[in-house]
Image (cartoon, rainbow, N blue to C red):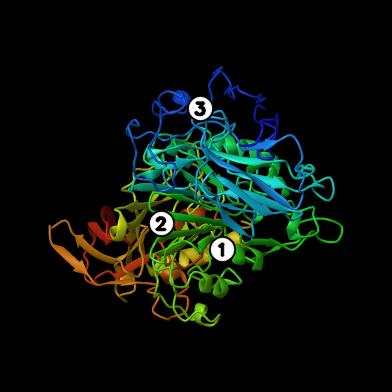
Amino acid sequence: MQEKKPIRATLLAMAAVTTLTTTVGTANAAPGLAGSSDLGSSLPGSIDFGSSTPGSSDFGSSIPGSSDLGSSTPGETGLYEGSVEAAENDAEDQSAITGHVFDDANKNSTYDDNEKGIEGVKVTNGRAVTTTDAKGRYTLPVYEDMNVSVTQPAGWQVPVDADNFAQFSYVHKPAGSPQDLKFGGLKPTGAVPEYVNFPMAKSQATAKDDQNCVVAADTQTYDKEEVEYARKGAPADLTQRNDYDGCGIMLLGDNVGDDLSLNPDLRSLYKDVNGPVRALPGNHDQDYDVDSDKDATDTYRAQFGAPYYSYEVGNTHFIALDNIEYKGQKPGGGNGGYYEKVGEQQLEWLKNDLADVPKDKHVVVYGHAPIVNYKEVITDDAKALYEVLDGYTNAVTVGGHTHTMEHLRAGDKREEWAAEGIESLPIEQVVAGAVSGDWYSGGLTDNGVPHAYTQDAAEPGVYTLTFSGSGDAVTRGGFYTVRNEDRDHQQLIGVNSPAWRDWAAKAQEWQDAKKVGPEPEKIDPLAVSKDDLRDGKSYLTSSVFGGSSASTVEMTITGEDGEARTLDVEHTQPHQGEALNEGWEFTDPISATHNLSTSGNVAKASPHLWRAALPKDLAPGTYEAEVKAVDNFGETNTQKVTFTVR
């Protein structure tokens, strides 16, 4: 064990976060909790983590994956405030970086003499991947600009900072950012330190088989007003949930909207959630005033840490990728654009990271941009990524970026994908909706936040991956939770008629003309005229948020006479090799009516829309429509609405 020396501040803490001075033999003190770094009850809804006395949370073996949970309090998360430990002194050998992954029994973020290293934990420099030896020690080669990060094993929990963001990486960039960047960039880190140690505490929450993992895509606030809209939305909902304490929350990029000075506000939105927060960068989280991609995430790295990494919770291996490649600023300055691309360096790292992961293990690959969506192939090197993931039978890719909610299944086929060499989708793709919905557009709800219906007919919210079972019996599920709504709110049901389609076309023209001229008259998307029924092209529609090509949807209408009639239902985009079905006849009228009447995008297409032609002989009157939908994972949701025939 190396001699203890004062530690240098890591580059992961934001300037807005209180800096805690660590000295030999003393614990970091959380603000307001003198003498203790155990968060205890400082997180709303948190549980009592017990004593911080060394050994009090001993689960038995220090080997990652040990199932001996000892006498720990049931449900203990191991969540505590702390940081990565970096030595003040420089290493004699500047060609290598070394340190320990250790059991931080007293939760002071310092590798004390009586604490044990943890064997078999993966550590990476962003290229090579190594595992710690019997004493928890690792050594990796150094390159000039790198992120060193630890892969948290299941049964352990890395510390979090004062804003609840997981602390698992060290940034090394000796000269710092190449120029004074608008949002700060990276200050020079100097020489390689004598050691970089990664603390973690034992955790029953990350060891348990059953896990819920929240995905919050595209919070994307452009100003303080939108920060407050977000604060009333999904982040507030998450503080009322306590079902994700082990896996926590993944912020899936576009965490802010270009203005990186809003990063402290972003952190404040998720500070009071009930699990650790991790993040990755999106195209709106870049330093636009740099000349190449290699410096584009410098401010992100200074404030959040490594932009790509892995960790394990329960029986699942999680990977976060940075699949945004910035092109560099325009001549004279300004956002120069980007590619959606993983890149050779990350693909090589991914191969190394997966080298010891069994092919049948559940693997989640996060990236800001989806690999594909229902319209096209999005990530440029999609085929290369799929080659790396080949054989991982339980892998899924999860993206944001497009502000849509999609379940695309392995085996789905589309003409647009085939044109890019992907004849059949090799693994499932989830597109996780958006916290901001359609960029905080539309009129305000009763809660004072924009409706922000998404262009594919979903609503703002978060996605939750679920895992249950062990061994060969692990199963993955998932569900979408609409902001400020109960979980059973899973559909939008309306009536798409010829009159509505004519209205929508005129309303879109009015929107495209920047609302110059008379506004189209209001229309009721739950009403249809007797005349419109005659050609058989008036449809009862349902946008099923959790729908996929495996879903079944049943529609029944009941009139005032009590007679129930079952309708013939079709999926408008069944993913059977067809091209995109696009047009007003393939559009959800509920979300589109709102967006076209106020503001917001309408795609005139959706991967999760079902429709049934209304009978031509319906008499004028009021009808109840019941839609029973079975989602991608076999969960049934039934909703009812009333519509009118005039």
Task: Work out which quarter of the rendered image holds the C terminus and state it.
Answer: bottom left
Q: Residues within 10 Å of mark 2 (few under 14, many from 20)?
A: many
In the rendered structure, find residue 106 and report the number of the disc placed on it: 3
Please identify the quarter of the rendering in which residue 223 is found: top right
Question: Up-down: is 86 above or below 256?
Answer: above
Which secondary structure, mark 3?
loop
State the separation of the CA atoms marked 1 and 2: 47 Å
Q: Nearer the viewer, mark 1 or mark 2?
A: 1
Q: Residues within 10 Å of mark 1 (few under 14, many from 20)?
A: some
Residue farthest right in this picture: 332
Residue type of the residue flagged with mark 2:
Ile
Residue marked by disc 2: 590
Dividing the picture into quadrants, the one containing residue 5 is: top right
Taking depth in this image into account, of 195 and 391 the one nearest to the observer is 195
Compare marks 2 and 3 and give the one earlier in the sequence.
3
> Mark 2 and mark 1 in contact (Cβ < 8 Å)?
no
Q: Amino acid at mark 3?
A: Asn
Foreground pick, 497 / 112: 112
Q: Residue at x 58, y 61 (%)?
A: 510
Check disc 1 and report the residue beneath it: 352
Q: Amino acid at mark 1?
A: Asn
The x and y percentages for residue 18 are 65, 27
